[in-house]
Amino acid sequence: MSNHSPSTNLQSHFADAAQQADAAKLGMWLFLVTEILLFGGLFVAYAIYRAWYPEMFFNAHEYLDITLGATNTVVLITSSVTMALAIRSIQLDKKKQCMNYLIITVVLACVFLVIKYFEYEHKFHLGQLPGKFYTFEGIEGTNPHIFFSIYFAMTGLHGFHVIGGIGFITWLITRVKRNAFSSAYYTPVEMAGLYWHLVDLIWIFLFPLLYLIS
Amino acid sequence: MSDSKNNTIHILPLSLYLSIGSILLVLTAITVWVGVSFDFGPINLIVAMLIAATKATLVALYFMHLKYDSKVYLSLFIGGILFLAIFIVFTMLDTMRRQDIYEIKGTPLNNMAEMYQGLSTVDSISDSTDVSTDVSTIFTDTIQTDTTQQSSDIKID
């Protein structure tokens, strides 16, 4: 990577730093739209099977712990706030503060995964596994294994995104530590923010759809 | 840096982020409260989705800065949501209204997961195609391990 200008990381094929930042943001938004469509397929699968087997969905969802789900929602929303504040800090050139916010964001993301681990562990223990691995016998209704296939596919894909986010933000922390960003150039921090907010946004829909079925 | 007029940095006040965050947490509490305490039937789903959509809008407008950024990003985002909406609405129209045209009788895959045992999915699909039309391939999940027993699941007038 040839940095023509160390302060703004301006690449030679862009006219100025503003154009470069706009291009990066446009690319990021395109990526986020593909992410929405990726999860969209799973939301459609959810909608079809919930429409086909409403009673089974209700009976199966009772085995999800609303307290843990709601706690995870709060954790993720809080991490979204700290991520947004990290961007604000770097805009104000407060690098130390930015790093602290990023660290809090990563810690909250890890808390999310730990809670998710306990939820998964409990379901593994009961045999509420997806598809042909399903061995639980306590749920009334047609095809309860489908609910858990969808549950694990949706929360699992979301979980992988959380893991990806942790990697992304951890990398940012090392970059901030090396003084790579300033108010003149913080595009990677902003991109990580957009990504992290999308992960939060998807969970905002997953939580009521999976945990709060009536 | 910020002298370029189409890329002014919007540094939002700390209080804005904190109040949006608080609103999101309050809305989470409301959605849990409504979901646990009330049973309005299908209205519950609508209420939960409206609250989720409100939260998503707040996240997108303020945390993702769509309200302040170039409207190109907002149009991309809305465009994505629009295509997702088309995907969901048309699929649901199909799966919920198809019985108006065909007589469809859904059957359980099986009580539990044993239905997958000894069943090659490739075989089941090729078996199903000679049962009726290609409509049946869409309903492969109604095909039992014993295809001879249930071969007339899908009747087409």
Image (cartoon, coloured by chain):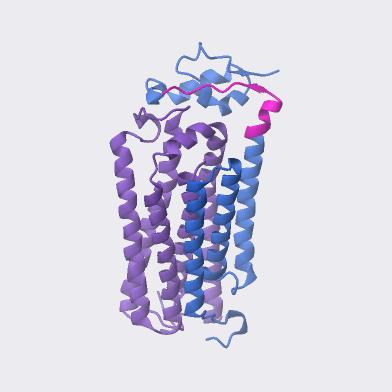
Residue A29 place in picture, x, y as percent:
54, 63
The image quadrant that residue A80 belongs to is: bottom left
The chain letter corresponding to purple is A
Residue A64 place in picture, x, y as percent:
39, 43
Is residue A188 visible in the rendered image? The answer is no
In the image, the segment drawn in magenta is B95-111
**Is B48 on the left-hand or right-hand side of A125?**
right
Compare residues B44 and B91 and report the one nearer the observer. B44
In the displayed structure, B50 sits above or below B103; it is below
Residue A194 place in picture, x, y as percent:
48, 66
- Is A127 magenta? The answer is no
- Is B102 magenta? The answer is yes
Quadrant of the rendering where the N terminus of chain A is positioned: bottom left
Residue at the location (51% across, 44% down)? A42
The chain letter corresponding to blue is B
Is residue A87 visible in the rendered image? The answer is yes
**Is A204 on the left-hand or right-hand side of B68?**
left
Residue A118 place in picture, x, y as percent:
30, 48
- In this view, the residue farthest toward the bottom is B3
Residue at the location (55% across, 50% down)? B48
The image quadrant that residue A14 belongs to is: bottom right
Compare residues A166 and A62 and report the one nearer the observer. A62
